[in-house]
Image (cartoon, grey):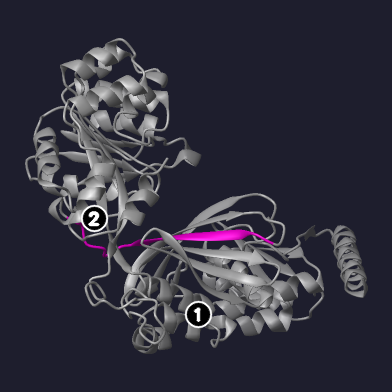
Amino acid sequence: MAQDLGRMLKSITRSEEEHLASQLAGKLGMGYINLTYYPILPETLRLIPQAVAESFHLVAYLRIDKVVRLATSRPAHPDLAKALAILKDKSGLEPQLLLASESSICDAIKLYATLPSMAQSDEEVTVSQEGEQGWQTKIQNLADLKKKIGTVPTTNLLDLIFAGAIQTGSSDIHLEPTPNGLRIRYRIDGVLQDITLLPKEAYKALQSRIKYLARLKLDIRQTPQDGRFSAQAMSQPLDVRVSLIPGPLGEYIVMRLLLHNQALLSLEQLGIRPNALAAIRTAIRKPHGIIFNTGPTGSGKTTTLYAILAELNQPGVKIVTLEDPIEYKISGIDQSQVEPEQGYTFATGLRSVLRQDPDIILVGEIRDAETASTAVHAALTGHLVLTTLHTNSAAATLPRLIDMGVPPFLLAGSINLIIAQRLVRKICANCQGTGVDPKSAGQICPSCSGTRYKGRMAIIEVLVPDAKINQLIATKASLTEFEAAARTGGMITMKADGLAKVAQGLTTQEEVDRVTEE
């Protein structure tokens, strides 16, 4: 009760301070700004040296072309005019001075403490020297990370979280505030694993720094936000996609890690069975038509399509991609990232791409009827189109496209191939066949951290539309009819493909059931 009252009184006091500052600004004929949660960019903050900022209570918070907006809580300082003149002379910028409260300025000055830990690039975070030289040897597996993460100071915490994620092969980092503290989880080989529970104080520090790096609004907590920034950990450059959604105890933060230097896999390296591989290669050699790769998020669709692109990438072929985001940069291919906020969507982008004289087009995802229809038309007019769609099976793609409004007469004959896939974890090669339970006390496998699994492989089904399938498309048949026709035509289902890999000792029945059970 006493704590709640204290917070209430503090809030009232701060609100009153901002009100008085606003009134004073009016009397002085100045503008007013509250910098408490203002998203100040690093390059703007650096326009005023920290020592000058502290001496004059002066902060640069916004630059627009040749104008820089400054805030001060001490407009009557006798040397302030001289400081502004020096800034104008050195930077060539025109200063505009606004009034801010003392507390507001103090909050902004605290941001200087974050600058030394950032990389030279204003959008990049770099793991510290200790991370590069020490953590790489100290963190070999999850057990090492769990021991280390609770011992580092808050200023190095984000660096260590990134270093641990890279070292353990994580694709996503989850930060989740709970009543007991901040829960950190990594998604490793498609499965979330608990890393640690940190004190509540660590959450605020991490939240502020992540928002700052991703250029998100610090004062917005009840609305979802998305952003991105660049980072470097364990000598690995990566892009970080940030998603925040509000929760009862704070914002849930998820960071998706996209490695720049991640090697492209070949179709053989994906573990595709020989007959399916032959069907894929036959389909991609055709000069036109459309190839769909379907499955839920995180099922490896993009990896498979990139493997296909790598095989198709030849000097005499023009390949253009539309992606969100660009996950791999491939030499010799024209890659474009859609920006829905700017009106550059898959649908609008695809129309523009068709004017680029392409031979092969990759559309990252079919999300609407317009994109679907345009992609099919492109396939019918002499282009090979590769794309993805969210369906549960290869056969389910056909009624889904019909439901989206694509005319059946256009679909029949335009589809070269439909791939549906999932990713299953592979049995850890280090502890396989040893007869030792990887979770047994004192004998935890250092490679898989006792999970039994290390790495993933694809299980797939491949549907090559035949005369029967095309006939069913024309009659807008049901999913059951499409599935029956696909099996009659010889399609091996994902489940059957997975069980074959179980028999080969590559994965387990539990894994196959986990990803194929509806």
* Type of amino acid at the residue the image marks with label 1: Ser
User: As rendered, which of 372 and 142 lies closer to the eye?
Assistant: 142
The residue carrying mark 1 is: 117
Image point 30% across, 58% down: which residue? 508
Image vertical order of residue 235 relative to residue 60, above or below: below
Please state the horizontal and vertical placement of residue 486, each as a whole percent of the image.
23, 27
Please indicate whether residue 415 sits to the left or right of residue 18 in the image: left
Quarter where residue 318 is shown: top left
Which residue occupies the extreme left position in the image?
A: 316
Of circles 2 and 1, the one toward us is 2
From the top left corner, tell me how far across and down residue 52 is, in percent: 65, 82
Q: Where is residue 355 shown, x and y percent of the image? A: 25, 28
Q: Marks 2 and 1, how far apart in space?
A: 47 Å
The structure residue drawn at horizontal position 29% and vertical position 33%, both measured from the top left corner, is 394
- The magenta region covers 250-265
Residue 106 appears at what percent x and percent y?
A: 74, 76
Q: What is the crowding at mark 2: few (fewer than 14 residues within 10 Å), some, or many (at least 20)?
A: some
Question: Helix, strand or loop at disc 1?
Answer: loop
Query: Is residue 109 one of those drawn in magenta?
Result: no
- The C terminus lies in which quarter of the figure? top left
Q: Which mark is residue 502?
A: 2
Relative placement, left or right, of 502 versus 92 is left
**Residue at 39 percent of width and 83 percent of height:** 139
Q: 510 or 218, which is in the foreground?
A: 510
- Vertical side of 16 occupied by 489: above or below: above
Q: Is residue 344 visible?
A: yes
Amino acid carrying label 2: it is: Val
Neighbours of disc 1 within 10 Å: few (<14), some (14-19), many (20+) = some
In front: 149, or 391? 391
Across the whole image, how many numbered discs are drawn on residues? 2
